[in-house]
Image (cartoon, rainbow, N blue to C red):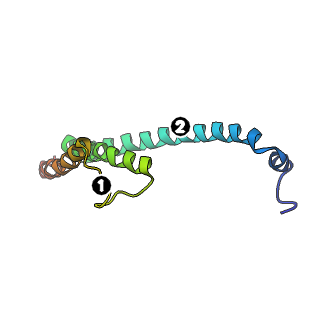
Amino acid sequence: MRGLAQQNQLKEAAKPIEAVVPGLTRRDLRANAALNVVLGVLCLIYLYMLFRWWNWLVAAAGLIVMLTRLPDLLFEIKTDQKLSAANMPQRPIHIFATLFMWLALPLLWWGLCLRR
């Protein structure tokens, strides 16, 4: 709409797409890096709070659940579809991650029973 766009935005819109894309790529890379740092710090805070308020067994169970979700998340990113029983991969890493996630439940139960 006329009057709402600033002059530099209008100049940016007049450029050919080949001139605009490299700037978007650099901006997206910076945004992804910043988001990864923020989410990494939040994960560390989450694990520290589990350790501080309960004990190391609960924090270990939380870490196991986070790490065992990685193969599924990478599969979802690669195939661009949500993981379900119909399209679940049967590779050894996925089976190991699923079993390891189930083994985190007794660890969590034991950690909650040993509350300080």
Question: Does dot 2 land on a helix, a strand or a loop?
Answer: helix
Which circle, 2 or 1, is nearer the viewer? 1
Along the horizontal axis of the image, is 51 left or right of 105? Answer: right
Q: Which residue is mark 2?
A: 33
- Whole-percent x, y for residue 93 in the image: 25, 41
Q: Quadrant of the N terminus?
A: bottom right
Can you give x and y, in whole percent of width and height, for residue 64 in the image? 25, 43
The residue type indicated by label 2 comes to Ala
Front residue of 104 and 69: 69
* Secondary element at image label 1: loop
- Residue 6 is tagged as none
Circle 2 residues within 10 Å: few <14, some 14–19, many ≥20: few
The residue that label 1 is drawn on is: 88
Q: Quadrant of residue 23?
A: top right
Q: CA distance from mark 2 to mark 1?
A: 30 Å
Give left or right: position of 31 versus 100.
Answer: right
Q: Which residue is rendered at x = 83% and y = 59% of the image?
A: 4
